[in-house]
Image (cartoon, coloured by chain):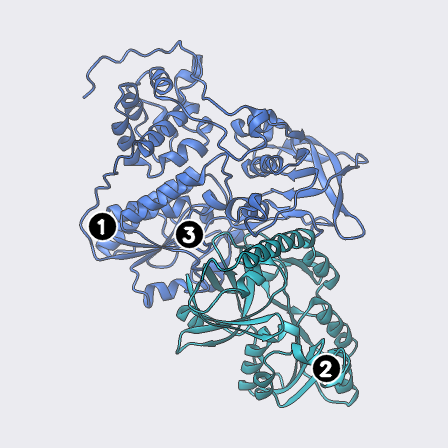
Amino acid sequence: MYLIKEIKEIAPKIKKMVLDAPLLARKHKAGQFVMVINTEKGERIPLTIADKDPEKGEITLIFQEVGKSTIEMGLRKAGEYIFDVVGPLGKPTHIVNYGTVVCIGGGVGTAPLYPITKKMKETGNYIITILGARNKDLFILEKEMESVSDEFYQTTDDGTKGRHGLVTDELQALIDSGRKIDLVLAIGPAIMMKFVSLLTQKYNIPTMVSLNSIMVDGTGMCGACRVSVGGVTKFVCVDGPEFDGHKVNFDELLKRQAMYKDMEEEALKKFLEELKKQESCGGCHA
Amino acid sequence: MPDKKWIPQPKKPRTPIPEQKPEVRRRNFKEVALGYTVELAIEEAYRCLQCKNPLCVDGCPVGIDIPGFIRHIGEGRFEEAYYTLKKYNSLPAICGRVCPQEDQCEQLCIMGKKFKPVAIGRLERFAADWFMQSGKKEDFQIEPPTGKKVAIVGSGPAGLTCAGELAKKGHKVTIFEALHKPGGVLVYGIPEFRLPKKIVDIEVENLKKMGVEIKTSAIIGKLYTIDELLEEEGFDAVFIGTGAGLPYFMGIEGENLNGVYSANEFLTRVNLMRAYMFPEADTPVKIGKRVAVIGGGNTAMDAVRTALRLGAEEAYIIYRRSEAELPAREEEIHHAKEEGVQFKLLTNPVKIIGDENGWVKALQCIKMQLGEPDESGRRRPIPIEGSEFEFPVDTVIMAIGQGPNPLIQETQPDIEVKRWGIIKIDEQGRTSKKGVFAGGDIVTGGATVILAMGQGKRAAQAIDEYLKTGKWE
């Protein structure tokens, strides 16, 4: 059981949750993730640790409310307990002084990007950050990311903040300006990572992506997270989560991510109906 | 001492065990075999000849006094029967259900020469179940504390056994389990209809009563390395029983299509995560109308029978050799057939065909014939050229075997491994690293529950010796 010390909405449908987890706070390395089980009957949800405070013994998780499990978790309150958290899992990011690193975060992908960027900066890299979102309200960790960046750019699909366009447009502009880029690190929706990788491949810029495939155990035991990398099947949970973006079969990843779409929708519908029933009843707890 | 003369009844037929009817059980997850009643158990016990030199004991990896416990049952001394079992085997309720007795004790039973062997496994299960249901408090007989600390990595059959043995000797034992529930393969792998989870829970509770601490969701190699356990966490010895958790795939085209599972994933979703309760439990599992399970071992049988219970209309075993070579237990094959599982033998998939959305549509298979025996002693399957055919399916489950989980070996290079990451041990269960022992599937690459338990037990003896003497030579 893990105590929720704080939980709040930091953007529409995006929640930040601080857990009391001293051991995980001490052991976690940038790039690693945890599996979170909200309730006893809950599924194992892979989430990246967005921040940690080893002194206070805290880890910060950021998640988007997309389905039953995450919405249910978002309804939890400070002082309550999360059923279980397992980790740290996956290989830590290989962080050295690459030179100039472009860190690209899409949507909630900024959460896992932040600790890596922070560490990249500490290691002496020149950090150019590009954050993308559909509109200005959907950005998270803007201040945090800006504080660890030498240059900071934002893009929105609707033009409400920063460049009107996609992260790849900003990246293209950077490349066109003749800047030397030693590494691109992209974390976000699979489709974003796919197009970032396609772009950088044209210019031979090494590119690292962090994959968010479906997982069950997260320890290499089931293979649910398998993905083709350079034609070889890899397990995201133990071989990743980071891979060479130029080698990842994103189309396969996208299809595999949608494997349970219909069942997820069914579970969500049922959950929302029950939630409504409970709310309309009202008064019982007063 | 026995209070009356034992008059064996060898001519009586082997007592059948009551079972759920196939047409009923194929759609539920309740246990298939219901177990002997007191009367049936006594009846079967009297079939035992009480040999002076019992051969059955030689076939038991943990050397249970088989005639002894059977005699107790025959005489109605069920509690004594239970404690006789426990002296050798810390998990009799589990072994009575999942041991391959037909290849071990029962294979050597002298009764089997002329008649059918005594149903040793069923009697073992009876004695254990009887004790569990009696509500009696178990007398654990624990020696005084030694002040020594042992870490057990993995809570499967090897780890649980090793923990129990060491706790009895008065050592302070902590089990580290990667998943959120203890039991290892007994919980994530073996389905409820073959081994009810309640039984594993009781055994785990017993260990806790013996003073064993169980830390779940604690992944060694990630949360702590073995070195950290020994140097920082104050453990005097470590036992690695991390099992064969790495699923193998065939390496054929289409294996990453949607609807293709490893047996590990499929069974974990259903057993550990309770996907059969979806959406009440959050983890989903996809089951199509036509399900093909590739492989012929016990895991394949578990997967195919689970698929039926989840509502598959047709469930197939696809196996490249013939029926005689099927590695699964006879009983499991028999049960699967009774439940309507269809066997496509001498057949091997060469490719999985998907539809435009990335979902499995069919298996491309090839017919096989058997050639000369290979290094495993089984006749080698050879593809028959030009015999390819398409077999429409919605779900494919790969049950072609598992390998050792590499997490520990990756972070602890001073533990020597053989090929495929199997940890090397000596005859006492010692690894190449001082104070570190191993047993179970992590050293065999994949075997049975009882073999893992046997190794857990043997390692416990060696650990006890090491803790007492400090000698590592």
Letter of the chain shown blue in the rendering: B
Mark 2 neighbour class, 10 Å CA radius: few under 14, some 14 to 19, many 20 or more: many
Q: What distance separates the C-alpha of mark 1 from that of mark 3?
A: 20 Å
The numbered dot on residue B170 is 1
The one of B459 and A244 positioned closer to us in this rendering: A244
Mark 1 neighbour class, 10 Å CA radius: few under 14, some 14 to 19, many 20 or more: many
Measured as percent of width and height from the top left, residue B269 is found at 56, 48
Q: Residue at x 64, y 29 (%)?
A: B322
Residue type at mark 2: give it.
Answer: Thr
SS class, disc 1: loop
Q: Are marks 2 and 3 in contact (CB under 8 Å)?
A: no
Residue highlighted by disc 3: B154
Q: What distance separates the C-alpha of mark 2 from that of mark 1?
A: 64 Å
Measured as percent of width and height from the top left, residue A231 is found at 71, 59
Apparent side of residue A194 relative to residue A62 in the rendered image (left or right): right
Letter of the chain shown cyan in the rendering: A
Is residue B456 among what the camera can see? yes
Residue highlighted by disc 2: A155
SS class, disc 2: strand
In which quadrant of the rendered view does residue A63 lie?
bottom right
Is residue B461 among what the camera can see? no
Measured as percent of width and height from the top left, residue B128 is found at 34, 32
Between label 2 and label 1, give the one nearer the viewer.
2
Residue type at mark 3: give it.
Answer: Gly
